[in-house]
Amino acid sequence: MYFLILLAFFASPALAWLPLEDWGSGNVTGSVGESGQCICQVFLPDTTFPADRVESLQISSNKLTVDVELHISKLISFKGKVEILLQELSNLTFRLEVVESGPDKYIKLDFELLRIELREFEALVTELKTSLNSSSPAFDSLYNEIRNMSMIVDQLESYDRSNLEVIRIEFTKLQKKLEKCRDEQDDFSNVQIGSCQHKGILRVGKPVVSQLNANLGTGYIYGGWGKDSHPLPGTENRYWYSAATTTVVRYMSVYSDYYKLIMRQAMKTYDLLSPKNWQGTGNNYIIRANTFYYQYASPFSMAKFNITSQTAEYRAVPGASSRFSYHYHANQNLDFAADESGLWVTYATEASKGKLVLGKIDEAAFALSEVWETSIFKQSVTNAFMICGVLYATRSVDTKTEEIFYAYDTQTRQENYVSLPFEKFQDSYVSLDYNPTDQKLYMYNNGYYVSYNVKFKTA
């Protein structure tokens, strides 16, 4: 019976939603069936079924269902966010309590980080409030708490005038600087400049790398740099540099001081090929008394280029052979050196069977005044230099370590095998010279300017 009444109710789209008195000519009749049931019959004048209305109701119902499910999903998501935010708020509160408790409880006063976290927290609360379209007092309470915490952060930062953590950090930095300074000072020479009142080298300091060469090319591995070992008045601060991609010696530049060297601003660059061919070869040259000493290319001899007059001359070294070079590179047959006692050259001869020979140069006559023969084979040596009339020879230990392994005293004619390791910036090098004006070693190491402080044994 209920089914028939409901069916009749939806039978007319025009009248189904009207009051009973407005149904027009429709009528309702009732009777009793064979089994005693009540049967009601409803007659409506319009028999069209409102299918479009039913479909519209179904679409509206589905849309409402989706909207409800979306809001439920948002509520679940925001519930999780609120729980996370409450945890973060609790953490911030704890951190502020620690900071407030006193300077002795400071862990790390990162006030800006606290501000960022508070801003993020406020943004999330705003998002939650907007999404829920709510003006609940709970949101106002959260906003007030965030503002209060921001004020506390500002106050703490203003109170933290000494900022103990920053002081600790700066103090640690200062300690490291002082330790480094002490270490470097410990490597400085303990002997007056020009004095030989010591018992030889105690140790060589750490490598000081100034920069890449003035040509700005790693291919310029053959060269040298340094200061005049016996400068003329007014030239005490000058530096020089010469390098090439081969062992040819052609260009040599002079700089007024160390700053100009680093800035690659040469006073003048000299060309040994022009106006005359005064080119050299090898890499073991120095400047002394404003004169550039180097190995002449042809004929094989020692040469000097006067920087003032810009003229060159050469002299043969008696017995010197061009067959014996240093271990690292070829054409290092004549190696010039200077120390507190004057100008020197090392080489090897056929008569010495390749053993290293040391000659003292008379600068005025530009000739050898005395010669010493050592017991070390030159090709096993990587380089050599002079300090106070003592020849020191080096050899490679590994890619990062060089060793002064031999010393020959020209005064006593005694030789000693020693072990004075020092650090290399890069594997191989072509030039290593001592300068008596500052008691430093100058190395040209794969295109880089490198220097070392030298510490001496006390007399």
Image (tube, rainbow, N blue to C red):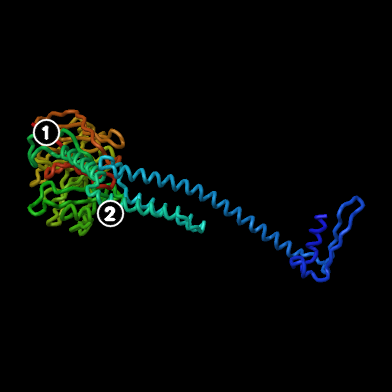
Question: Mark 2: which secondary structure?
Answer: loop
35 relative to 270 in the view: left or right = right
Q: Which mark is residue 410?
A: 1
> Residue at the spot x=74%, y=62% of the render?
54
Q: Identify which residue, 107 or 121, lies in the foreground.
A: 121
402 relative to 371 in the view: left or right = right
> Residue at the spot x=9%, y=30% of the render?
412
Above/below status of 161 relative to 184: below
133 relative to 179 in the view: left or right = right
Kindly identify which residue carries mark 2: 215
For discs 1 and 2, the disc positioned in front in the rendered view: 2
Question: The disc labelled 1 sits on which kind of residue?
Answer: Thr
94 relative to 326 in the view: left or right = right
Q: Identify which residue, 430 or 19, lies in the foreground.
A: 19
Residue 204: x %, y % from top left = 19, 37
Q: Is residue 282 visible?
A: no
Q: Identify which residue, 376 or 14, lies in the foreground.
A: 14
Q: Place residue 11 in its image quadrant.
A: bottom right
- Mark 1 or 2, nearer chain start: 2
Task: Judge the density around disc 2: few (<14), some (14-19), many (≥20) Cα neighbours within 10 Å.
Answer: few
Q: Is residue 156 visible?
A: yes
Question: Mark 1: which secondary structure?
Answer: loop
Q: Place residue 322 in its image quadrant.
A: top left
Above/below status of 369 relative to 62: above
User: Where the C terminus falls, by quadrant?
Assistant: top left
Task: Judge the density around disc 1: few (<14), some (14-19), many (≥20) Cα neighbours within 10 Å.
Answer: some
